[in-house]
Image (tube, coloured by chain):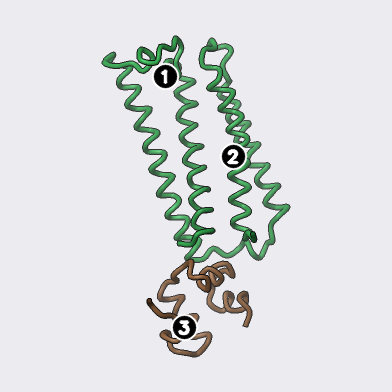
Chain colours: A green, B brown
Amino acid sequence: MNFSYKEKSLITSLVVTLLIFGRYFFGVFSNVTATPSEQFDFSDVIRVIILIAILEGIIKWFFSKKDEADLVDERDKLIDTKSYRNSYWTLCIGAWFILMQLLFEASGIWSISDHLSLQHLIFSSPTYIAHLLLLFFVLSEVIHFSTQLFYYRKGV
Amino acid sequence: MSQQTLATKVGVTRQTIIAIEKDKYSPSLEVAFKISNVFEVPLEEVFSYD
């Protein structure tokens, strides 16, 4: 199965993002009942993002052919447009989900913690809300990469 | 003519030419006309709609 430079680049980005952010979010959300001092420091996010950027740059430089990477033609732009549409909707759904939950919790009409019987739930802490929002950002990026890969392999 | 040569003359990537040949991508009119101009044949001889 031959992959073009663009496809290799996408696979690299996807794998690196999933591995690093997967590990990061596993640590964050498995620590739901931790006290604020035990929770992940949000500055870890900055380190994770920098690490991802460096790793992706190194891997892409190692596997790339410079001339193949330069040109972005109409097919690339079309695939980019379609994938940004999908990632936009993912982010929108995530943002609305968090917004609605915050509104419901603030109004006292309905609380997810009452229904799931969890003492310290994800939405009770601003840090976890921030992590949840970050999760949806990462999810939208994963959708962005995956959609591009799908269209590059299947055709558009 | 190689795929890369055609791609360079038309102004697209080699992968786009491959995708067109494999029927995985329908080029724009501009690219379609450029391809037919490279081969110096009418558009209908290069592309057809089934």
Q: Splitting the image into 4 quarters, where does residue A39 fall? A: top right
Q: Which residue is mark 1?
A: A123
Q: Residue at x 42, y 72 (%)?
A: B28
The residue to which callout 2 is attached is A17
Dot label at residue B46: 3
Which residue does the image show at 53% across and 77% down from the upper left? B10
Residue drawn at the location 38% of the way across and 33% of the way down: A95
Percent coordinates x, y for residue A61 in the rendering: 70, 52
Q: Secondary structure at mark 1?
A: helix
User: Relative to A7, is A30 above or below?
Assistant: above
Q: Amino acid at mark 2?
A: Thr
Earlier in the chain: of badge 1 and badge 2, it is 2
Callouts 3 and 1 on one subunit: no
* Three-letter amino acid code at the position of disc 3: Val
| Residue A58 image point, x, y percent | 70, 47
Q: Residue at x 50, y 54 (%)?
A: A150
Count residues near mark 3 (Cα–Cα under 10 Å), then give few for <14, some for 14-19, many for 20+. few
Residue B33, disc: none
Q: Quick check: A96 above or below B16?
A: above
